Image (tube, helix red, strand yellow):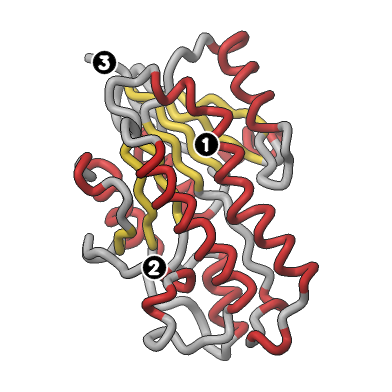
Amino acid sequence: MSETTYLITGANRGIGKGVLSAFVARPNITVIAAVRDVTSALKVFETVPVATNSKIITIKIDANSETDPAAAVAELKATHNITKIDVLVANAGLLETDTIVPVLEAKPDAIRRHFNVNTIGPLLLFQAFYPLLLASSNPRFFAVTSTLGSIGSIPTYDVPFFTYGVSKSAANFLVAKISYEVSEITTVAFNPGWVQTEMGNGAARGVGLGQAPVAFEDSIRDLVGLFDGVKKEQSGSFLEAGTGEVIPW
């Protein structure tokens, strides 16, 4: 059986770890876990069950770094003999709870920090791994974004997440633009839901809620199902993990 190779950023916690765990529980899977701190991540992955002929490779990619993605490519080729990436998942994200404010209170420095991680990070990741994606017979680039970045959904989600939302809106534009300019790669944005992770629950508390509404296990199941089932003709779309429905840009 042909081995499938995934790379997931932010893979040591939250949604990233959940998706990683789901994939390496299958046989003949390589998951490259991209993390900020390799040493601490290796300890986390010691408890993750790994199926026959599957493995986790841990590498450093800090979403704030302009050089880490290219360095990771070089390391994967030289040290781990990686010749292709089938599925590249830009999952690492930033949401600082003290930046949950309306437009009139948004601070430029906070916006820059969120853009660095949530928009520029996925861009640099895609640019660096583009050649390895092209080596796959079915290359896919998936970005975990947010409905809070949907311009069409602003009236539905009347919450003061301007700083985070504008960076995710730009990430959504990146996905749409890649799908047109690099049509040979299936490129899709996904909203995982407002999930009960450290980030999701922190955001919920920031607007006066006890916790996020979407159970972690439900989000991972739905997200992995969509990752598995996405079709080439869906490239350039923004999908809701819970329903598979198209979200307006």
Q: Residue at x 52, y 70 (%)?
A: 200
Q: Distance between the residues labelled 2 and 1?
A: 23 Å
Q: Residue at x 60, y 78 (%)?
A: 162
Q: Is 99 left, or right, of 235 in this rendering? A: right
Residue 199 vertical position relative to residue 161 in the rendered view, above or below: above
Residue 147: image tag: none
Residue 109 vertical position relative to residue 76 in the rendered view, above or below: below
Q: Name the residue under label 3.
A: 2
Residue 149 horizontal/vertical position (percent): 48, 69
User: What amino acid type should be assigned to the residue bearing mark 3?
Assistant: Ser
Would you call the spot at circle 1 few (<14 residues within 10 Å), some (14-19), or many (20 or more)? many
User: What amino acid type should be assigned to the residue bearing mark 1?
Assistant: Phe
Q: Is mark 2 on a helix, strand or loop?
A: loop
Residue 193: image tag: 2
Residue 147 horizontal/vertical position (percent): 42, 70
Q: Is mark 1 on a helix, strand or loop?
A: helix
Q: Name the residue under label 1.
A: 126
Give the farthest residue toward the right. 109
| Quarter the N terminus occupies | top left
Q: Kindly tell me whether residue 46 is visible in this rendering.
A: no
How many labels were placed on the picture? 3
Give the farthest residue toward the front. 181
Q: Which of marks 2 and 1 is nearer the N terminus?
A: 1
Q: Quadrant of residue 88?
A: top left
Residue 19 horizontal/vertical position (percent): 40, 45
Residue 46 vertical position relative to residue 249 in the rendered view, above or below: above
Residue 164 vertical position relative to residue 69 in the rendered view, above or below: below
Q: Residue at x 46, y 57 (%)?
A: 173
User: What amino acid type should be assigned to the residue bearing mark 2?
Assistant: Gly
